[in-house]
Structure formats: C-alpha cells, structure tokens
Image: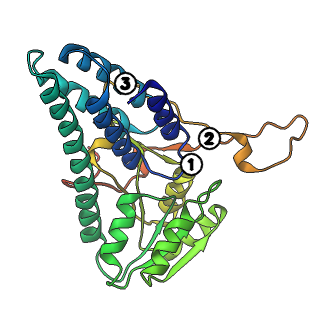
Amino acid sequence: MSPTQFNLAVKEIRDDRQHGASELARRALAILAEAARTLPVADVRRLRERLAELTVELATTRPSMAPLRNLLYRWRDGLAAIDAGMELALARVAAAEQAEALIAASRQAVADCAAQAAELLGSRRTVMTHSFSSTVVEACRLLKDRELRMIVTEARPLEEGRKLAERLAAWSVPTTYITDAQMGLFVAQVDAVLIGADSVLADGAVINKAGSYLLALAARDRGVPFYVCCESFKWRGADEPMPDLEEMAASELDVPDWPMVTVRNVYFDLTPTRLVSAWITETGVRWPAAEP
C-alpha cells in the first residue's frame, strides 16, 4: 500500500456519512491488514513501527466513534507479540490475520447484541429508533416475523433513516417514517426506543447521532424505556477524556449564505446516563445501578 493509497483510504473514512462506527472500524482494520501485507519495509521491526503509525492516524480520524480507537489500538497492541526475529513474510501474515480476527469478532458482536435486544423486546412490540445502527437493523431482522412495528426518524441532514425504512419495507415490517421534529409526538405510541451508539462513556452516557438526546428526554417524559444496543468495543475507558462531538460541513443543510447567520451541523450529541433504561451488549443487558 502506497502513501497515496493510504491517505485516500483515511479520507474515505473521515468523509464517510453513510456507515456506522463499527462498519468504519472494520474498514480501517481491513486497510491495516492490506498495509501489513504490502508496506515496503525491510524488516519486522520497521513493519511494526510503520503499522503502529498508520494505526494512530486511522484511529483518530473520527473522534466520536469509539470502535476505531478501541479495535485499532487493540490490534496495534497485538503487534508486540510478533517477534522481531520472525521472517518478514510470516510477520506480514500474522499481522493481517490479527486484523481479520478482530473484524470477525466485531461482526459476531453485532449479531450477539442484536440477539440480546430481540430477546429483551420480545414479540408484538412497537419500537422507535433514530439514525441507522447495524445492531438495530439486525434486531429488526430477528423480530420481523414476530409482529414487529417500527417508527423511524428521518435523521437529518443526510436522512439515514430512509435506508432503514427501505430495509423494513423489504421485510414487510409495518413502519411509520417521521421527521425528527415529530419524535415527541410519536414516542408515546411505542413500547420501547432502541438506538445504537457511536461511543459509550465509562459512566454509561451515550454519544450517538444528534437527536438521540431529545428522543431520550421525550421517552423519559412518556415513561417509555430507552435502550442502547451496541458492542462492548464502543465503551470508553474511565481514563479517556470526553471526545469532541464531530461537526460536519454546513453545506449539508443546503441553505443560502445568509449574512450574519451561522449554520451549525454537529452530528453527535450526548445522552446522559440517567436517561438510559438499559445498555445491551453482546454479553447481556446491563441495568442501571439501584439508587442507594
């Protein structure tokens, strides 16, 4: 992989607005696996050094998305097990296989999260969601023949909800598609809210597509459970600072260049722990700690 090819791959991940955090983390791991196989280096020590440098660059492209940091740094740490005295060809294979194993683990975690969510929700439920989450999509697939009904927000500005509504239509799941501004009107009609997450802080606060906080507030006001379904790879450590909430180009809102008007397009918001009814991971359901 040449520097130009790598830089293009980094730009692709940085500019991606269609895929979730886990999908982008798997894409980044695939890029690193290719780099492990093809980087022009003379020995194993230099291979490890260059791969570690590329890992840091990829891991910091999307600060709101914990899987890029967590999965890529886990892979980088695993490179230490590759002995500097190993044949270079074998070291390349070992590094690539470690990345591919993490890709497989990430995919399995999504499937296991969805299975946990489907078991918690059960049959004959009306569920509301916001944005497009791979875990939520898989949970819907598992529940599609169990009288599932969905309410899906459009998730402006790029309307990721359309993709989910299209998927649900193909599965013949009765679905209501609404603007983000109608969240408060429709949340009273559902049995639960189920969203994914781009990151979960150590205390359980959730970083997800902007609008998630508003939906959580509306759900709490109406007494509707607000569930967050995501892999444990998305949890941040207690020693990690609050990441920047990414802001994208104002042009995505497609408004004129009005004088004295500042257009903001912050993609993520923070839902505090107190508004989350439960966190669903691949290992099970975590309920809030009981008040003392």
- Say which element carries label 3: helix
CB within 8 Å, label 2 to label 3: no
Q: Disc 1 marks which residue?
A: 210
- Say which element carries label 2: loop
Viewer-proximal residue among 189 and 82 = 82
For the residue marked with disc 3, what is the amino acid? Leu
Circle 3 Cα neighbour tier, 10 Å, few/some/many (<14 / 14–19 / ≥20)? many
CB within 8 Å, label 2 to label 1: yes
- Say which element carries label 1: loop
Q: What residue is shown at x 62% (from left), y 61% (from top)?
A: 180
Query: Tag 3 or tag 2, which sits nearer the N-term?
Result: 3
Q: Disc 3 marks which residue?
A: 54
For the residue marked with disc 1, what is the amino acid? Ala
Say above or below: 275 vs 120.
above
Query: Tag 3 or tag 1, which sits nearer the N-term?
Result: 3
- Residue 80 place in picture, x, y as percent: 16, 21
Q: Disc 2 marks which residue?
A: 266
Residue 165 in view here: yes
